[in-house]
Image: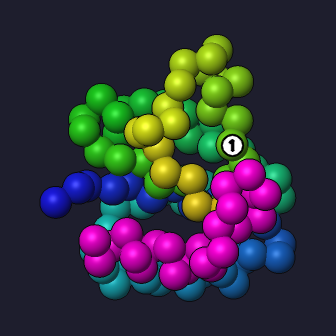
């Protein structure tokens, strides 16, 4: 079974979404980090923890965080190793809500 560690983002419009996701993760006993980040927070805010997860064979899942890892790591690619959940980023083409995607990962 694949191990995940969830990194929570959020902004004013998605605070209730993050509260629901945090509740889902707590009830599932899932590992997560929440720095109570503000609007337009990026995945790089968690970069040291993301790198630590990867080194320990844990799949980082960034929820509603901007995708700036490529820039923050000086072009080191994490595409196949980090999951980005953010229905607001056009290029990701995600039609399901963040909550639905988290539940899907927890049940896989």
- Judge by depth and name the residue closer to the eye, 59 or 27: 59
Which part of the image, by quadrant, shows the C terminus?
bottom left
Disc 1 residue crowd, few under 14, some 14–19, many 20+, Cα 10 Å = some
In the image, is 85 to the left or to the right of 58? right
The image position of residue 100, as x and y in percent, is 52, 81
Which part of the image, by quadrant, shows the N terminus?
bottom left
Residue 37 in sight here: no
Looking at the image, the residue that sits furthest to the left is 1
The local secondary structure at tag 1 comes to loop
The image position of residue 3, as x and y in percent, is 25, 55
Instruction: Give the residue at mark 1.
Output: 67
Please tell me in which quadrant of the rendered image residue 97 appears. Answer: bottom right
Please tell me in which quadrant of the rendered image residue 58 appears. Answer: top left
Residue at the image position 42 percent from the left and 48 percent from the top = 60
In the image, is 80 to the left or to the right of 30? right
**Magenta includes 35?**
no
Residue at the image position 78 percent from the left and 57 percent from the top = 90
Please tell me in which quadrant of the rendered image residue 45 appears. Answer: top right
Looking at the image, residue 71 lies above or below residue 61: above
Residue 90 in sight here: yes
Looking at the image, residue 27 lies above or below residue 37: below
The image position of residue 46, as x and y in percent, is 56, 41
Looking at the image, residue 3 lies above or below residue 95: above
The image position of residue 85, as x and y in percent, is 58, 61
Colour mode? rainbow
- The total number of labels drawn is 1
Segment colored magenta: 87-108
In the image, is 69 to the left or to the right of 47? right
**Magenta includes 104?**
yes
């Amino acid at each position: 079974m694949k191990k995940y560690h969830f990194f929570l983002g959020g902004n004013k419009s998605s605070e209730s979404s993050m509260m629901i996701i945090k509740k889902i993760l707590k009830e599932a006993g899932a590992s997560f980090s929440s720095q109570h980040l503000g609007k337009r927070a990026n995945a790089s805010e968690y970069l040291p923890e993301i790198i630590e997860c990867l080194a320990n064979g844990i799949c980082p899942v960034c929820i509603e965080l901007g995708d700036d890892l490529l820039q923050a790591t000086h072009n080191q690619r994490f595409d196949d190793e980090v999951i980005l959940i953010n229905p607001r980023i056009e290029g990701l083409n995600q039609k399901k809500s963040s909550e639905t995607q988290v539940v899907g990962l927890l049940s896989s």
